[in-house]
Structures are given as structure tokens and as C-alpha cells.
Image (cartoon, rainbow, N blue to C red):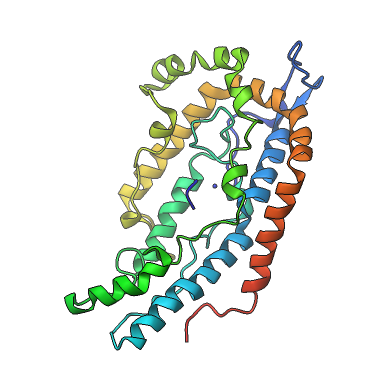
């Protein structure tokens, strides 16, 4: 997907996430920040799909795209490798697919600790070991390239993991009209102003762009541990660096995060009511994919 998420312990106890009301902004008397974050995660899953729905989409795409390309090449009398089905979402849970972190948003999770980034590299490692990351169709002879291009053209030359979500997901992702006004609110902007100094003075990070900082490559799928084997030094060091970076970000962002979440809490239900029809349409489309993929085998004939 173009977006472009098991929760680790928070930097602060849940009890400390209760904040006082924000005068004049309609915040509840005691805003349950952790509860609001959970509601935001649930909305994210409703829009962008849960693990079962994403995996069903992969499997449908596998049969459509990989199956179509293989059949086309065979019909042309050309050799073709049948790629195996490898799900990007093995190892994920729904808890990893919520709003997440690394968007450069004040609403980024404070408990993610870079787990989504780590899971993505583990997924890439599985794909690489299965031979579907770089040469999904296997080595292609020069004489077969034209036919392969013809056979992949109906799918925009994509491979099966690169599926499109249901119509409406891109429009709803990011929750238009809900989050942006809060992030632009002068109080939230003011609460974020000390962030860069905090990151530099307290943690030694010079951050000009939060998303670039959080997703600076610190690990590689090439170093990812294989099941049953201990991780190597590069992977262990990189994961430690990811945790440190995300922990520092959450710590320095926490005042603005609390404020933004307290402002968000009373606005979620009205936004959902306003977009009910679109949300229901997207939900139905995700569920239909699960139903359509239910009896599909994880392999091609």
C-alpha cells in the first residue's frame, strides 16, 4: 500500500495520560488519552484494513496478477517461474496496523517504538528468502523480456504484493477534516515548538523533519534474523537505535500529543457520523475481499 503499523510498553504510565480540560476547546473534563488513541487505531483499521483483510487482498492479488502473468507466459511458450505466495503481514497483529508512527503527525503513536518499521524489514527478509523481492519471475532471458512485459502490462507491471485498497480508502486515510485542523491549532503548534530543542538537548538528535528522522534506515532486511536463529550484531544494534529514536520522539512530543488527543476525543464521533456512508462502503469492500479469498489456496496450479 502507499501509506503508507504487538504494542510496546509506553514511555509513561497510562494514568499519566489523563490531562486537564483545554479551556474553550470542548475537551472532556478528564480526557482519556490512551482511550482516544485506541479509538483512533480502531478507525484506522476500519479504513485501511485489518490483518485478515490485508492478507485476503494479497491472496486475491496473487491469484489475479501472478496467476495471470504465469498463464500468459505459458500460452506464449515462454519459461516463467511461478512465484510462491508470501504474505507481508505474517508476524503482524491488528495492534501493529493502527494509526502507527512515522507520519510526522503529532498524533503518531507513542507506544509504537518503531515496531512497524521492524516488521516491514522482517517481511522484506521473508520475501527475499522466498525469491519474490527482486526477481519474482526468476531470471528472464533477453528473448523473453518482450513477452514478459506484454504479460505484466495488464497489471501495470506490478507484482502481487502491490495491491490497490478498496475505493475510498485513499480519500478517508488521514481522516480529512479531523486531524489537520487540530495540528494547525495555535495551542498545538505552540506545544510542538520545543520539540526540536528537546530532541537536541536531551537526546542529542538534530531533527529537521520528524518522518525522515524516524525512518532513517537503521536496519536492513539482509540482517534480519531467521526463525530459530539469534539476531546478528547489526540487527541488534539497529533495533536498539530504532527504539531509542522513537522513545526520544515520543518523550519530546508528549505535551503536544496529550493536548492534541484531548482536542480529538470529542470530535471523533461527529467525524464518523459525517462520513458514515463512506466508512460503511469501505468496510463492506474489505469484508467482501475476505469472503472472496476464503477458499483460495496459497499456491497456483
Residue ID at (28%, 84%): 79
Pinpoint residue 244: horizontal percent, then vertical percent. 44, 33
Please give left or right for residue 15 compared with residue 121 in the image.
Answer: right
Please give left or right for residue 225 compared with residue 50 in the image.
Answer: left
Is residue 158 shown to the viewer in this render?
yes
Pinpoint residue 252: horizontal percent, then vertical percent. 51, 21
**Does 210 appear above or below 239?**
above
Marks counted in the figure total 0
Pinpoint residue 163: horizontal percent, then vertical percent. 49, 61
Using the rendered view, name the quadrant where residue 71 is placed.
bottom left
Please give left or right for residue 90 compared with residue 146 in the image.
Answer: right
Using the rendered view, name the quadrant where residue 158 is placed.
bottom left
Pinpoint residue 119: horizontal percent, then vertical percent. 47, 52
Looking at the picture, tell me which residue is in the foreground, 271 or 107: 271
**Does 189 appear above or below 48?**
above
Is residue 139 shown to the viewer in this render?
no
Residue ID at (77%, 28%): 266
Looking at the picture, tell me which residue is in the foreground, 268 or 124: 268
Amino acid at each position: 500500500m502507499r501509506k503508507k503499523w504487538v504494542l510496546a510498553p509506553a514511555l509513561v504510565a497510562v494514568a499519566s495520560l489523563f490531562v486537564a480540560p483545554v479551556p474553550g476547546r470542548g475537551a472532556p473534563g478528564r480526557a482519556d488519552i490512551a482511550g482516544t488513541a485506541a479509538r483512533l487505531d480502531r478507525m484506522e483499521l476500519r479504513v485501511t484494513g485489518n490483518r485478515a483483510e490485508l492478507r485476503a487482498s494479497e491472496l486475491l492479488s496473487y491469484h489475479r496478477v501472478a496467476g495471470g502473468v504465469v498463464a500468459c507466459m505459458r500460452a506464449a511458450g515462454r519459461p516463467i517461474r511461478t512465484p510462491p505466495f508470501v504474505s507481508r503481514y505474517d508476524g503482524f497483529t491488528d495492534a501493529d496496523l493502527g494509526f502507527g508512527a512515522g507520519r510526522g503527525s503529532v498524533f503518531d503513536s507513542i507506544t509504537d517504538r518503531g515496531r512497524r518499521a521492524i516488521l516491514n524489514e522482517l517481511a522484506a527478509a521473508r520475501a527475499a528468502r522466498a525469491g519474490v523481492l527482486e526477481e519474482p519471475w526468476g531470471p528472464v532471458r533477453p528473448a523473453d523480456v518482450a513477452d514478459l512485459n506484454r504479460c505484466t502490462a495488464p497489471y501495470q507491471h506490478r507484482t502481487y504484493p502491490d495491491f490497490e485498497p478498496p475505493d475510498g480508502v485513499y480519500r478517508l486515510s488521514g481522516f480529512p477534516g479531523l486531524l489537520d485542523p487540530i495540528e494547525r491549532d495555535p495551542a498545538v503548534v505552540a506545544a510542538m515548538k520545543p520539540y526540536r530543542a528537546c530532541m537536541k538537548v536531551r537526546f542529542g538528535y538534530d531533527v529537521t523533519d520528524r518522518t525522515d528522522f524516524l525512518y532513517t534506515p537503521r536496519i536492513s532486511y539482509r540482517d534480519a534474523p531467521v526463525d530459530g536463529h539469534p539476531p546478528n550484531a547489526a540487527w541488534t544494534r539497529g533495533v536498539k537505535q530504532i527504539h531509542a529514536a522513537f522513545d526520544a520522539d515520543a518523550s519530546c512530543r508528549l505535551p503536544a500529543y496529550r493536548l492534541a488527543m484531548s482536542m480529538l476525543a470529542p470530535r471523533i464521533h461527529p467525524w464518523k457520523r459525517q462520513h458514515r456512508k463512506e466508512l460503511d462502503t469501505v468496510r463492506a469492500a474489505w469484508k467482501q475481499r475476505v469472503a472472496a479469498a476464503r477458499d483460495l489456496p496459497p499456491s497456483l496450479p
